[in-house]
Amino acid sequence: MKKVAVIMGSDSDLPVVEKAIGTLKKYGVEYEVHVYSAHRTPAEAGAFAENAVRNGFGAIIAAAGKAAHLAGALAARTTLPVIGIPVKSSTLDGLDALLSTVQMPSGMPVATVAIDGAENAALLAVEILAVSDDGLREKLESARRENTAKILAKDAEISAKYQ
Ligand code: RP5
């Protein structure tokens, strides 16, 4: 199975990124975690992306806040799918990071999740790997069934309460 790379722009992003790591763990996906910044360590970030296919990765998750160019900078150097997590790490509540991550030019896609949406970023990475991995697909389908059952149980409880 291919690995997932989890890259964050600063160690201050870790509390958000940990949710993605936890989800990858839950699905038994191999991953590597790094701190590389588009601005502070551009050479290292670029080299990681350029070597990612050769190093066995199938998707890259990139989390950054403020002027969040990390996901785009990685996407510019690889044809692997890149998933951007805009991190709420500034006085602008993450809107700055959301716009910096999502507004990519044509030809250079980044799949952007919600502000601090680390769990969905990991699930999207798992779904990408599951395209060629039936075991992983079955795990995703089973989790969807569990979620459905949980919501329907809440529906039954709340609708009974207000009858
Ligand atoms: C971004 O700037 C990082 O991704 C982080 O979200 C934000 C603040 O970084 P620190 O100043 O906390 O290192 O590049």
Image (tube, rainbow, N blue to C red):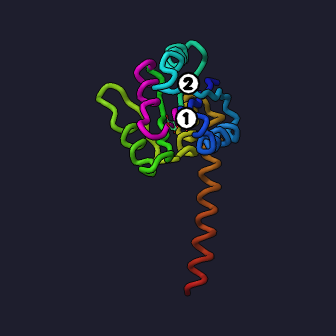
Numbered disc total: 2
Q: Which residue, given by chain and number where applicable, does mark 1 sit on?
A: 125
Q: Which residue, given by chain and number where applicable, does mark 2 sit on?
A: 58
Query: Is residue 73 inside the magenta stretch?
Result: yes
Q: x and y percent of residue 144 in the render?
A: 59, 51
Report the residue at 45% width, 47% height from top: 94
Instruction: Give the SS element for disc 1.
Output: helix
Q: Are marks 1 and 2 in contact (CB under 8 Å)?
A: yes
Report the residue at 63% width, 61% height from top: 149
Residue 129 vs 96, above or below: the answer is above
- Mark 2 residue crowding within 10 angstroms, few (<14) / some (14–19) / many (20+): many
Query: Is residue 134 inside the magenta stretch?
Result: no
Circle 2: residue type: Gly
Q: Nearer the viewer, residue 133 or 4?
A: 4
- Does the image show residue 61? yes
Image quarter for residue 138? top right
Residue 114 vs 35, above or below: the answer is below
Magenta residues, start to end: 62-78
Image quarter for residue 140? top right
Find the distance from the CA under tag 1 to the CA under tag 2.
Answer: 8 Å
Report the residue at 64% width, 24% height from top: 1
Q: x and y percent of residue 118 in the render?
A: 56, 43
Q: Which label's residue is closer to the chain start, 1 or 2?
A: 2
Instruction: Give the SS element for disc 2.
Output: strand
Q: Which residue reaches farthest bottom?
A: 163
Q: Nearer the viewer, residue 98 or 59?
A: 98
- Mark 1 residue crowding within 10 angstroms, few (<14) / some (14–19) / many (20+): many
Q: Nearer the viewer, residue 83 or 126?
A: 83
Left or right for 73, reference 130 = left
Residue 61's tag is none
